[in-house]
Image (cartoon, helix red, strand yellow):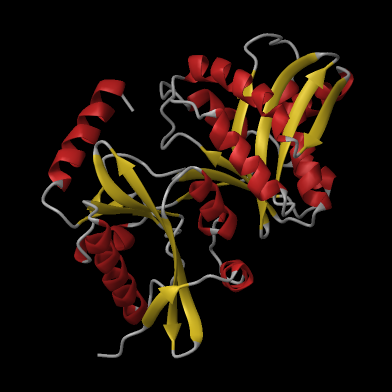
Amino acid sequence: MYNLKYKEVSDKKTWEDFILSHNPRSFLQSWNWGEVNERLGKKIYRIGFYDDSNLVGESLIIKENAKRGPHFLIPGGPIIDWGSQVQINAFIKCIKNLAREEHVWFIRIRPEVMDSRESKKMFSELGFVSAPMHLHAENTWVLDISPPEESIVAGMRKTTRYLVRNSQKHNLICEQTIDSEQIKILSDLQKETVVRHNFVGFSDKIFRYQLETFGKDNQGKLFICRQAEKDLAAAIIIFYGDTAYYHHSGSTSNYRGIPFSYFLQWQVILEAKKRGIKYYNFWGIAPNDNPKHRFAGVTTFKKGFGGKRVDWIHARDLPVSLLYVFTYTFEFLRKVFRRL
């Protein structure tokens, strides 16, 4: 049977040129996402799959030395042709070999593959099982921002359109910066958001490394919405390829009468349009329309801007050790107790 060769890719341009030439793609497989994880102290592999000298696939692999079990993460990837059994075979062979070398218990992936009965069947036949936890945003909301501004506004829900226009009357400003010293503003605002929506927040270090790493390549900015001296909302936006991603955010629980969140979103959209970007990815939403879901309010807010739902397949685990059962049991019980 014909096999592809695989080896590590050490050249940033080679890596990025390949990722950015493919669709779908994700910043979670970008060179800079690997840099962020290296700065966090994690071991990474940037693997290229080659047909002779022709690069046909890539996979960023992140090693997690978690207490619940060492494992590999492959978020938003691998970037391969899922219709090619040759490429799939090369990928499986590669990750199993690396897993043995690194003594990990399992490999968790969440590729840019649409959620469907067929895709679930494919991964099941490859030996993957549905993971007890998610891996980054799986249910997302995406808006095409290529039309003129007035067309985008016209496509909004009536209430959203009113609040976007009304936000212009409150003397709000939106600062854009790559100064990582401003990260504390986002961190403080996210602490308030965590209390409101009951989720586990992120550290200052993660925010800082993302802003510094993507910011130096003009691929990331921190947006801060203010009224006078009051910091009302902040978000890290990743600009990658033809998409802007609303990745991390936080907002105050006060000043409910000021539509600052709508102002911030509109300013991000305008900046993305200036860059010639086609899509705005609002990132995660609730997996269903249950009004009692903890993210129901956030989902309604995001959907109000117009757009469409994009559901990627839920994270899949490939067990490579019998010890995986301990991880699965731990994560499953944690999910139950936290009502996630």
Query: Residue 290, how many percent across, how many down?
Result: 41, 28
Residue closest to the far left: 322
Residue 87 against residue 161 in the figure, above or below:
below
Q: Quadrant of residue 52?
A: bottom left
Q: Quadrant of residue 116?
A: bottom left
Closer to the camera, 333 or 188?
188
Q: How many marks?
A: 0
Closer to the camera, 317 or 261?
317
Q: Quadrant of the N terminus?
A: bottom left
Residue 197 against residue 78 in the figure, above or below:
above
Closer to the camera, 88 or 221?
221
Query: Residue 273, how many percent across, how many down?
Result: 79, 50
Is residue 321 visible to the viewer in this orientation of the structure?
yes
At 31% from the left and 86% from the top, the residue drawn is: 3
- Left or right of 203: which side holds 224? right
Query: Residue 235, how many percent across, how many down?
Result: 66, 32
- Left or right of 230: which side holds 297? left
Is residue 305 visible to the viewer in this orientation of the structure?
no
Residue 142 against residue 263 in the figure, above or below:
below
